[in-house]
Image (cartoon, coloured by chain):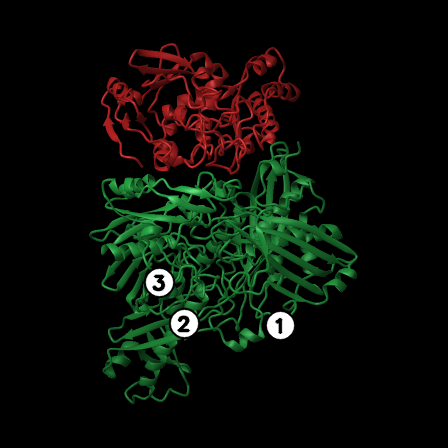
Chain colours: A green, B red
Amino acid sequence: MSLDHSSDTSARPTTRYGSNSGQALTRRDGLLKVTGQATYAADNHPAQLAYAVMVGATIARGHVTAMDVEAASRHPGVIEIFTPDSAPHFAHDPDEKMPPFGFRLELLQNHSVRYAGQPIALVVAETLEAATEGARLLKPAYETEEARTTLDNGVEFDPKAVGVGGPPSTSHGDLDAAFAASETIVEAEYSTPAQYHNAMEPHAVVAEWTDDHLTLDMPNQALAMSCASYARYFDIPVENVVIRSPFLGGGFGSKAILNGPQILAIAAARKLKRPVKLALTRAQMYGPVGHRGQTWQTLRMGLSGNGRLKAIHHRSISATSSFDDFLEPAANASLPLYAADALLAEHKGLRLDIGTPGPMRAPGEASGSAALEVAIDEAAEACGLDPLEFRLLNYAESEPGSGRPFSSKALRECYERGAEVFGWKQRPRAPRTMQDENGLLVGWGMGTAVFPCPMFPAQARTTVRADGSVLVETGGVDMGQGAWTALAQIAAEALGLEAHEIEFRSGVSTLPDAGVAGGSGHTASAGLALSKAGLNALAKLAEIAANDPASPLFGAGNIGVVPRGGRLVRRDDESRGERFADILIRAKQSEVTGEAKSMREPENAEKFAMYSHGAVFAEVKVDPDLGQIRTTRLVGAFAAGRVINPRLVRSQYYGGMIWGTSFALHEAAFIDHRTGRVMNADLAEYHVPVNADVPSLEAILVAEDDPYVNSIGVKGVGEIGITGTVGAIANAVWHATGMRVRNFPIHIEDILVL
Amino acid sequence: MNLFDYVRASSVDEAVAAGAKPGARILAGGTNLVDLMKMGVAEPATLVDITRLEELKRINWLSDGSVRIGSLVRNSDLAYETHFAKTFPMVAEALLSGASAQLRNAATAGGNLLQKTRCSYYQDVASACNRRNAGSGCDARQGLNRLHAVLGWSDHCIATHPSDFCVPLAALDAVVEVTGKGGSREIPIESFHLLPGDQPGKENALEEGELVTAIRIPADASRFAAHSRYLKLRERTSYAFAVVSAAAAMMIEDGRILEARLTLGAVAAKPWRSREAEAAMIGQMPSKDLFDHAAGIALREASPSGNNAFKIELARRLAARALSAASAGTPTAMPALPGSPLSTFSGDAHVA
């Protein structure tokens, strides 16, 4: 992998004094992880631990008619078997949704089977082996109904919402008129497959009850929200639930929402009055813990003679389960990006006998971008324009539809920098015209990346102590992305300290709510709370000092003070100041605490459209005889507000671009439509890229100063790298071969000329 | 996983005695068997652990120049044995194109021969599979089968043998040494794996309780060292089973092919050696046309077993490519991407 950092502009248009943000610190938890000292949920072994194993349905639709509970019970070590006939009671009806994000769940409430892999029993035993064998001995019998897992036999419907509560249809302008006025119309259909999160760490929980207090060791992307939901299922006060989630081996959205198996394990622990551990197997992660739902998309674009987009009509049929709704808002990918006179993005739902899909890294944005960016390439081709030229020609200077200004948009710079580093200018327009010295076909393609920058309500607390120490607390979630590191940098920045000078606590629900680690909004949300909490603590210190005649800062209230290296100093004369600790000691206070709840300024949220942007350029080489494709170069240039830690940000972009490679060329669940079952539910057959599939990656950090997104200027980087990349690779495959593949992932036989 | 007895064998005789009991299975590297036990596909009554048998861990060069590979020799130890890799380069390349570094460090030579098909219906106890459960049917036949067999399949089973290692072994006339209650015997590798016919459960020529003790490659196989290649088409650049693979080797003198070998992998329930294709090249001058012609012969009897007709043409092209690469000469250094068709060009230096 090429790790050329020469293109790093550090993205620091506004260097903030006393700040260690902008520094490429290594992950605070890195040493623990590489030395095996980081304890993941399933590494916990409290005394008296019992082991639970879930039994998943092997049919997609029907009923369980029998299970050999007796045989399983007789197996040595088996303690208890939960089936619909011996199901635990829950205070919340699992067939009802749990606002805001909770789905309908399978908690053994009846004998029906609604998808393959649905939990139909839970076996608890003294050992994992005994529970596993007990589960096998249940040998369920079924009454099977036809599985509906295809576009043909699924049930289409008009959804009330797509994604997380978004409108199913969005439009602006007069679409019919715009198409009528178009000289060229380009239309094509695209499909994206079911994909599964496949976090390295499976969904695991160690549940322990003490009376009606519940402690959970589990990987969790939404600590406070999950506590509230568990409290409702188990009818206990929310403050009785503690979730410890110090380390997550990846989440990608699948650990933000409650799921049936984990709740059943918690219920088992309560009933058995001893701690219970459950860890799903890899295969069991293909069903009850969400996935990226399939889409079938149609893009129709109307173009003027000079290559201006007049109309965009983006339709998606998005798959969901037979009993709940989560629809990939794929068509919405067309909303914020290209200027057109008229646009309609609309969705249909398709009910299938599958587990309910859920948010998976860039939900909607990824699958929508995959189709949109290929369609844009096709439109450019139809107009005889270079794909970059075409994108610049249709550049949205303000938010399409609303006309709102963007809070910041350095997309043009992304195009420029990416194209320059990639060498895009040398690209011949016609496909199948480039070859390398070995006769391999070479193709170059590009795609635009875009992702919204949402923020979630978040809280934090900063305590400055008289002994000179500083404690910073927020219930942040580190899924491997480096939240602990970046958040500590933001907290330290607010205090004018270095990150190593503060004690940073995170990863437990008893700490202030850091919001959801999702939507690429965690750094911005929790970071803003931390920043404000620090400033609030300093304000208290300043007030003490400014009113203390013995302080060098006496009377500085109007002038103002700033933090510098553990001291507060006068803004107008930094030689006058004193240590935080000295202020407290003289005031005979052991500490001051600053707390903050943060949210985006509503006025800014109203006034501005807020997005991160980027441009991705891909080179592929294709063996003309064998159809073997390799992405030999990927260059992405991204602008996402202020960069707190370039190392971590680059790592997120790399991860996104690799994910995009996966989407374009590798990743798909193969469903046997006769049974509705995923037949490649393991990492040997469900392909994600290996290092050799991404031999050269480059992520360029384009500077962007955004005073409106939030006071720390942070947008979000977690998901944007996927968008743009999928299309860039597919377009490069077209450019190499002249073959337009519209169904993802692209397989060898799709480009084989037989 | 079912309850099972565990026996640690301290000699080959002990292993053979324990292995002959009903329901006994031999445990070596465990990279395949343990997975299958977790899936419930394998339910041995007894596991006979042979991993302490030092005599099976050796690579012995015999006085006649042949090599005897103990069945417990790890894939990576064999591939990185310098003399072995120089003498049988396509075997080393095949080994290094397989699985991941971690798996190669654990998986054994004997286990590689005995690995099970990756057919997803075989690996799934909820599916019908004649290979796993005689007479239950074959869900692959009308199911997801784009990577299934195009040669030697039957209505009872369309699974492939997934090995890379066995493909050049078949090309080089390797011999499998086995020991059973009745003593030791040798099985030519070509007769070792069986086509499914109407008894797909009978996967190889081993008699009940027989233990693979070694694999021997004959000395004269070294005459292909200068012109041999293993190529493997796969859906990601490493850590994937072959879509199709090919081992090609030849002896070239004065611009003519004196002898040629061609075996295909991932197209049948056994490595598919084509002696007819080999014969068609003898005495000929290497050329693209010749290799296309020979590859065509190798696939002459191929037919799709499902949604996999593309594999036939793909295998033909890969075989032609492998022959062409072999005729151009064995790379002097192992390609950075062993087995990759992207490593077939421009001589020795292949930069990953």
Please rate how many residues cluster around mark 1, counting C-alpha atoms within 10 Å: few if below 14, some from 14 to 19, many from 20. some
The answer to which of marks 2 and 3 sits earlier in the sequence is 3
* Number of the label disc, if any, that sits on residue B166: none
Total label count? Answer: 3
| Chain assignment, label 3 | A
Please rate how many residues cluster around mark 2, counting C-alpha atoms within 10 Å: few if below 14, some from 14 to 19, many from 20. many
Query: Which residue is denoted by mark 3 in the rendering?
Result: A233
Q: CA distance from mark 2 to mark 3?
A: 30 Å
Please state the horizontal and vertical placement of residue A703, each as a whole percent of the image.
Answer: 54, 64
Q: Amino acid at mark 1?
A: Arg
- Are both tags, 3 and 1, on one chain? yes
Residue A209 in the image: above or below residue A747 = below
Q: Does dot 3 land on a helix, a strand or a loop?
A: helix
The answer to which of marks 2 and 1 sits earlier in the sequence is 1
Query: Which residue is denoted by mark 2 in the rendering?
Result: A529
Residue B298 in the image: above or below residue A23 = above
